[in-house]
Amino acid sequence: MKTPTSIGTVKANKVTPIPIKLMEGEVRKLNAKYPCGKVSAGIGKRAVELVRLYLRKRYPGCRFRENPKKGVDLAIDSPKMLIEIKGTEDKDISWGKLKVSGKTSYLNLTEKRVRIYRVTDVYGRVPQIHELVYGKHFKLTCEPRWRFVRL
């Protein structure tokens, strides 16, 4: 079994995307379970499933943990990996749309060095994974947010 390493090639802080090669049957199953729609929860769930499909092909026999730690979307016991997954239907990384919510996610990325897999073109025939590393490809800045309160 291969040992986990970085999945993309980094040149001058750029990431070479890794295509997720899907079989026709996989596309049909994904479309049935996570149909194309503008619901971000569906996009996120489809992105997680795409990463699962990719990792099963890359690491045959890998085992996924059922209940990953808070702030982690996917945990793998063999090989040992923690991954936060961010999906988008856009064909590029769309940096302006990348957000993390909460201190747990922030600490996972900055201190525990949890991997970020940005899955682009989630509804496309060949989605892509971009592995992003904190301090190498991005930094996190705190933005104030305003909440709506019903009167």
Image (tube, rainbow, N blue to C red):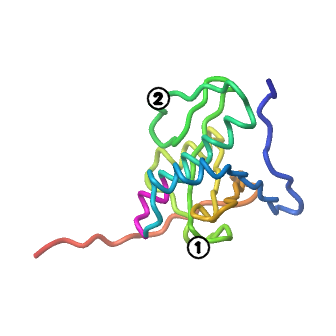
Question: Whole-percent x and y of residue 15?
Answer: 80, 59
Q: Position of residue 97 (x, y in %)?
A: 55, 70
Tell me what residue is drawn at x 66 percent, y 71 percent.
91
The residue at the point 57 percent across, 68 percent down is 89
Looking at the image, which is closer to me, 75 or 143?
Answer: 75
Residue 62 location, quadrant: top right
Q: Amino acid at mark 2?
A: Glu
* Residue 76 placement, left or right of 149: right
Residue at the far bottom in the pictured view: 151
Element class at badge 2: loop
| Disc 1 secondary structure class | helix
- Looking at the picture, does residue 150 appear above or below residue 3? below
Can you give x and y, in whole percent of width and height, for residue 37 in the image? Answer: 43, 68
Crowd tier of the residue under label 1, counting other residues whose Cα lies within 10 Å: few below 14, some 14–19, many 20 or above: few
* Number of the label disc, if any, that sits on residue 66: 2
Q: Residue furthest right?
A: 11
Give, as a single range, the part of the protein colored magenta.
38-44
Quadrant of the frame with the C terminus: bottom left
* Residue at the image position 60 percent from the left and 30 percent from the top: 76
Q: Is residue 28 magenta?
A: no
Task: Estimate the spatial distance between the alpha carbons at disc 1 and disc 2, rounded to whole Å.
Answer: 31 Å
Q: Are marks 1 and 2 in contact (CB under 8 Å)?
A: no
Badge 1 or badge 2: first in the primary sequence:
2
Left or right? Give the position of 65 relative to 110: left
Predominant SS along the magenta part: helix
**Quadrant assignment, res 101:** bottom left
**Amino acid type of the residue tagged 1 in the rendering:** Gly
Q: Residue at x 65, y 51 (%)?
A: 117
Label 1, on which residue? 96
